[in-house]
Image (cartoon, rainbow, N blue to C red):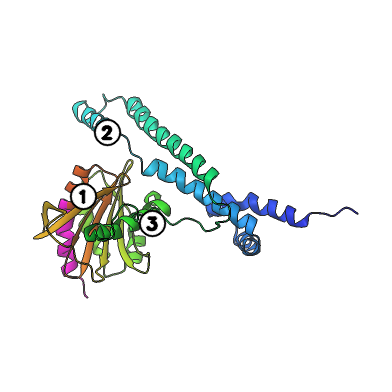
Amino acid sequence: MTLVGFEGSQCRKIRSYLDSYLNSELLVETNHELIKHLESCEDCARALEDRVRIKDHLKRGVLLDTAPIELRDRIRNDIRRRPRFGFSFAILERSWVFAAATAVLVGAIALGIAYRSRDLSTHAVRRPLSLEADVASGDQTGQILKVGFEDHVYCSIDHDMANEQFTSEQMAEKLGPQYEGLVTVVKQKMPREYVVVAGHRCHYLNREFVHLILRHANEIVSLIVTKKNGETFPGGVGASILQASGSPVYEAGWHNLQVAGMETRDYLIFVVSNESQKDNHDLASTLMPVVNDFLRNVPS
């Protein structure tokens, strides 16, 4: 007697849908079929987790690994020096493509090592990039800055919000009447080349954030506001010379990202970006005073 492998055929069918599922390209009925199958099939669930892991590694390889500062500065200086139509965009494109391709290659190599060494008995998808290994338990400043850092990674990178383009109406709806005016405040202060691509209220690790994402070419900047939950910067060590509305601004850098943070009576404010430390510092000095003023008028 020949046994027909119905289960194997169903698994092959489901696995052919996985990439489309991750890209939200399936019909509702197919989505339901896939989810129901994953609930009862550990092998297919593990295959989905592998694809998620691959996608995350490659995405972070590109977004978290920027071109060398010297290269970026040289390109910017060249743009400023040359006439508007005299600059060779082919040179600029090749430079950025080379930097991005290098980052992808590094990410792919790291992925290969991580994939070969992973524990096959572990089925859970890894958490987003974390600072747990970089922030000592006694580093109170680092622990607070980590709050803004992780929301940036969670929304802008892991959930690809940096590649969205919300309309003004969508941002107003997602931010609500309490915070929708923040978009106008930020647009008035940010350099003109930056575009506010997303504005929403999000929840991460049982905490609500007001989150604006700005882009200019490959530069991604997050302005993040969250209500304090008993946190207070310790003062003294770690504070930069930057002051926003009389309050010190604290800075740190992890994983090629820069974080600046300050506190008001009720809020924590963060500016997180893949810019250089100096550029992120300048952005924070521009944004934080006006955001602080805006929050003073927000009802408690």
Q: Position of residue 124 (x, y in %)?
A: 52, 58
Packing grade of label 1 (10 A; few <14, some 14-19, many >=20) is some
| Mark 1 or 3: the one toward you | 3
Which residue was labeled with disc 2? Answer: 72
Above/below status of 158 relative to 113: below
Residue located at (17% from left, 47% from top): 282
Figure quadrant of the N terminus: bottom right
Badge 3 crowding class, 10 Å Cα cut-off, few under 14, some 14 to 19, many 20 or more, is: many
Dots 3, 2 in contact, CB < 8 A: no
Report the side of 191 relative to 106 (left or right). left
- SS for tag 1? loop
Residue 176 falls left or right of residue 160: left
Q: Nearer the viewer, residue 293 or 36?
A: 36
Q: Tag 2, which secondary structure?
A: helix
- Extent of the magenta region: 285-300
Residue 130 occupies quadrant? bottom left
The amino acid type found where label 1 is placed reads Met
Read off the residue under disc 1.
Answer: 190
